[in-house]
Image (tube, rainbow, N blue to C red):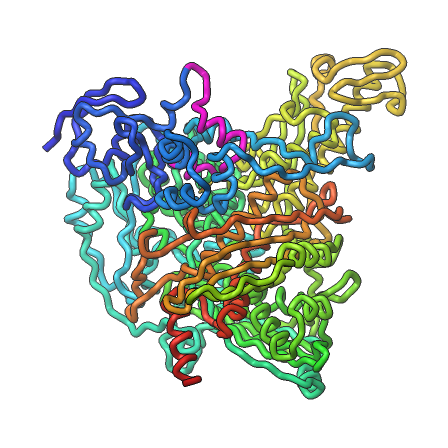
Amino acid sequence: MLVPIQFQVNGQSYGESVWPGTSLLSLLRRLGWVGVHRACESGDCGACTVLLDGDPIHSCLYPAVRLQGQAITTIEGLAKEGEWDPMQARFLQGQGFQCGFCTPGMILSARKLCEEGIPSEAELRERLRGNLCRCTGYQAILESIQGIPAEIPEWVLEDEPGSGQGPQSVGRNLPKQDGPEIVSGQAAYTGDFTPPGLLHLRLLRSPHAHARIQAIHTAAAAALPGVVAIFTHQEVPRRIYSTAGHSEPVPDPLDRFVLDEKVRFVGDGVAAVVAESVAIAEQACQLIQVEYEILPHVLDPLEAMKTGSPTIHDEPEARQIYNASRNLAGYVCLQTGDPEQGFAEADLILENTYHLPAVQHAHLEPHVSTSWLEEDGSLVVRSSTQVPFHCQRVLSEIFGIPRDRIRVIKGKIGGGFGNKQEILTEPLCALATLKTGRPVQWELTRQEEFTATNSRHAMQIRVKTGVKADGTLTAQEITAYGNAGAYGNHSQTVVFLAGYVPLGLYRCPHKRFEGFAVYTNSMPGGAFRGYGATQGTFAMESQMDEIAHKLGLDPIQLRLKNVIQPGDPLSLGYREQPDADLKDSHFNLIGSYGLKDCFEKIQTAFATPLPAPEGSRRFGRGIAISMQGSGLSKIHIAGMKLSLQPTGRILMRSGAVDVGTGSDTTLRQIAAQVLGIPLDQIDLIAADTGQTPFDAGSYASATLFISGQASRRAAQALRDKLIHAAAQRLQTDPSEVAFTWGRFSAPQGSLSLQELAQATAEPIEVELHHAADESSLTFAVAGVEVAVDLETGQIELLKSVQAIDLGRAINPRICHGQVTGGTAMGIGYALSEALIRDEQGQILNPGFRYYRIPTAKDVPPMEVHLIQQADPYGPFGAKGVGEITTNCTAPAIANAVFQATGLRFRQLPLTPERVWQGIQSSASHSA
Ligand code: FES
C-alpha cells in the first residue's frame, strides 16, 4: 500500500506516496536528484551517501517511508548562492576524482569527518572505509580533504617544431574540464538520462553452468500488468558475434548470440523482460518457467582441454574458434632460438607454476544503456561504453541495420577498466526498442557485474628459466593456460600478452611461449587493465626474484643485467600453429628509455636499512618491473576533426573515449599547444558516432599516444590553414603571418580568430585519421615495503614507490592519478581480490562486502616518480600510462613478502589465511 510522506530535499518541500520497499536512493533519483549514485545497493560503497539532518547515510539502505518530516541534503544542495562548499572547493583544487562516480559520496562523508577539524591521515583512511573509489587509489582524495594537493612538477616546453607560439598547455597540471560538474553532482552519467516513456529491461539468467533450454513458459510473466515485451532466443536474430570491441576484422572467436537456446555459465542470459518499471520487470522474470536439459559442465581449463570433456561450443554457426572439440578458444605459440640449447647452457634452471585468480573490474558505475528511435526511425543507443564505434558495428551486424542508421553516444562514464570494452547491454536494449518502438534502459545490478559480465582471466602459468651463475639468462619458457570462461572474447589476445610481454622484457637468445585460451563453464574472461601482461608479469617477476635469491645476486642488478635496451630485437617469432612458418610480429619498439632512472628512484627511496623485527612482525622489501605498449600499431585508428567556429573558438570533434582518466582534457591540451591558444578556447564533442570521426576506443593505453597524435596532427594542419586564410585577408604571403595567442599579425595589419571566422565564407576545418606505425614501450618499476605478522598472516603495506618511464607527461597531475589508481588496483590483486566459485559454477562473493577491493585504509601513501624523457613517436614525447602500474605492483608485494618471511607465494591473492597457512606449513616442515 502506498504511504504518503512529507520531506525536504536541499530545502525544497515534497509530498510523495511511496511503496514500503522503496529505498531513499530510488526516491531521490526519481525526483531528479541524480547526483546520488546507484552502485551497489547494499550499503558497501558509499556512492549513494546523502546527509540526513546533517549526518551521512547510505540512501540505498534507508527506507523512503521513514523520510516523514526529515530533511535531506544531496551533493546538489551543498553549494550556496554560487559559492562552493569548502569541501567541494578542496576536491576541485586537489582534483580528488577521476570518473567522479564516487565523488558526491566522498565529499559528503568527508565534510562530516572534518566538521571539527581535519583528522590525521591515518584517521581519515580509517574513517573513509565506507566510501570506495576504484579510480584514484585514494591519494588525491586524501590530499584534497586535507587541503594539501600534491605538488606535482610541471615541465617547460623547449622550442620545438609543432609547438605553437602562445600559452604553454602541455606539461602543465591544467584542471580536468569536468571538475565543476563532478563536485556539484551535475555530471550526467548514462543512467541519469531518462527520456519520456522509458521502459526498463531485466534479464532472467541461467542457474545452471551448462544446459540446453527445452522450453520457456512466459505466459504468466506476460500477463503481469506493466510488462510490455518478453524476448527469448526464439525472438532474437540468430547472428553470431563477439562482445569484444577492439579491432576490425575481429580477431576473437565469433561464439555468442544475443540469446541462445544453450546456456554456458551460471548467469548466462535466458529471457529478457521489458516493462514499465524495474520492479515489474524483476517480478516478471521470477514468473518465467524454464525447462532445462542439464549438461555436464567443466570449470577447470586443464580438464576442459581433455578428450571426453563436455564441448561448450557445438553451435554450427560459431567461427574462428581454434579447436571447439578441445574447448580451445585460442592458441598461441612463439619461439626464438633453441630453448633446449639454452637450458643446456644454464648453470641453474628454475621451473615454477603460478596461479592467478579471476578478479573483477569493480568500476563503480554499472554497465548501462538507453536506446530509442529518432523520428526518422534510426536507432540511438546512449551507453556507458569504452568503444562506441565497435558497438555501432556490432549492432549493425546483429540487426542488419546500416551503420549510418545507428548512432551510439558515450555518456559520462563511471569507470570501465576494460569491462566496458565489451558490448554487453546494448544489443538487448536495442532489440527491445526496435520491437516496441519505445525508449528502453538496462542497467546491470552489482550482482550481475560480479557474475555475468567479465573478469580478468584466471591463469595458470608455468615459467622455466635457464641462467648462468653470473645471472645471464640463457633460456626462458612460459606456458600459460587462460580460463576464457564461456565465451572467447579477448581470450586469445589476452593469453598472447601473458607471454609476449614478460618474455619481451628480457634479453635472452632462446625463448618459447605456448598459450592456451580454454573455454570453461564460468563467467567469461575479458579485457582488463593490463590485459594478460598483468598475469604474465606476476609469474616472470616472481621467478626473477627467486633466481636472484638463489644466485645470491641483487634483484635490481639481475634485472639491469638482462633487461632489454634500446636497439634490442623485441619480437618473438610468431606462429599460430607449431608447424606454420615463422613470421615476425613487430608490435612494439623502444622509443624513449628511462628505465635506468626508474631503478635509481626506487633505490633512493629504499636506501635506509630495513626495519628490524618487532614482535611477530617481519619486514620486507620487493621490486618488480613491467612494460606495456602504447596502443596497437597499425591497428588502432583515431579520427580528429577541428573547426574554427564563428565565435573564433575551436571545436574539437573526437571519437576518443574519456573513461574518467582525463583524456578529454589532455587531447585539448595538445591541440591548444599546437594552435598557440588557451585551452579554454577549445570546445569538445566526443565519442558520438553521429557527430565525431571514428576512434577505435579507449583501451590498450592508446588514447594519449594515438588519439593524442591525431590531435597534434589535426591542430598542425588547422594552424596551417588558418594562417593561409589570414594571409589572404591581410593580402600578404603566409610566411609573413605570425599566429600567437589567437591573433594573426603581419606587417600589413592584424586580425583575431573571431574576425577571421566572420570574414570567411567557407568553414575552416580539418579532419584526419591517425594510426601509429610504431607503439612505444612504457616501462615501470615498483618498490614496496611490507610488514608481515607471523601470528596472523596479515600483510601491511607500509610504503609504495612507483617510477614510470612515460616519455613526457602531457598533464602530470592526470598521469599521477593514473599511477596511483593503477597501483591500488595492483594492491587489490595482490592482497584481497578473487572471485570465489562453487563446484556448480556459482560465484559466491558477488558484492563489495565479500569481494574486497582496497579501501583508503588498505593502500599506503604512494610515492610517484614520473621519469620524463621525450619519446620520438608520441605526441610531444608522451607514451601510454594507463595500465602499466597495475602489472608490477603484485609481484613487488609477493617479493617483499618473501624477504619478510622466507616464503615464496605463487598464488594470489595473499590473504591472511593463505599466508598464515604458508607460515604454518613451513614451520611444520622445518620442525
Ligand atoms: Fe572514484 Fe571513479 S573517481 S570511482
Q: Position of residue 124 (x, y in %)?
A: 42, 41
Q: Position of residue 712 (x, y in %)?
A: 72, 37
Q: Position of residue 339 (x, y in %)?
A: 67, 82
Q: How many labels, in total?
A: 0
Residue 778 appears in the rendering: no
Residue drawn where x is 85% and y is 21% of the image: 737
Quarter of the image with the N terminus in it: top left
Relative to 116, say whether 125 is above or below: below
Give the side of residue 919 with respect to residue 40, left or right.
right
Residue drawn where x is 79% and y is 35% of the image: 162
Residue drawn where x is 28% and y is 69% of the image: 840
Quarter of the image with the C terminus in it: bottom left
Give the side of residue 853 with respect to residue 870, left or right.
left
Relative to 572, say whether 345 is above or below: below
Give the side of residue 595 with respect to residue 439, left or right.
right
* The image quadrant in which ligand 1 is located: top left
Q: Position of residue 627 (x, y in %)?
A: 64, 59
The answer to which image quadrant residue 185 occupies is: top left
Magenta segment boundaries in residue numbering: 81-105
In terms of depth relative to the viewer, which is nearer, 121 or 580?
121
Residue drawn where x is 32% and y is 56% of the image: 850
Residue 812 in magenta? Answer: no
Residue 393 appears in the rendering: yes
Residue 100 in magenta? Answer: yes
Relative to 908, say whether 150 is above or below: above
Relative to 322, say whether 285 is above or below: above
| Residue reaching furthest to the left | 1
The answer to which image quadrant residue 261 occupies is: bottom left
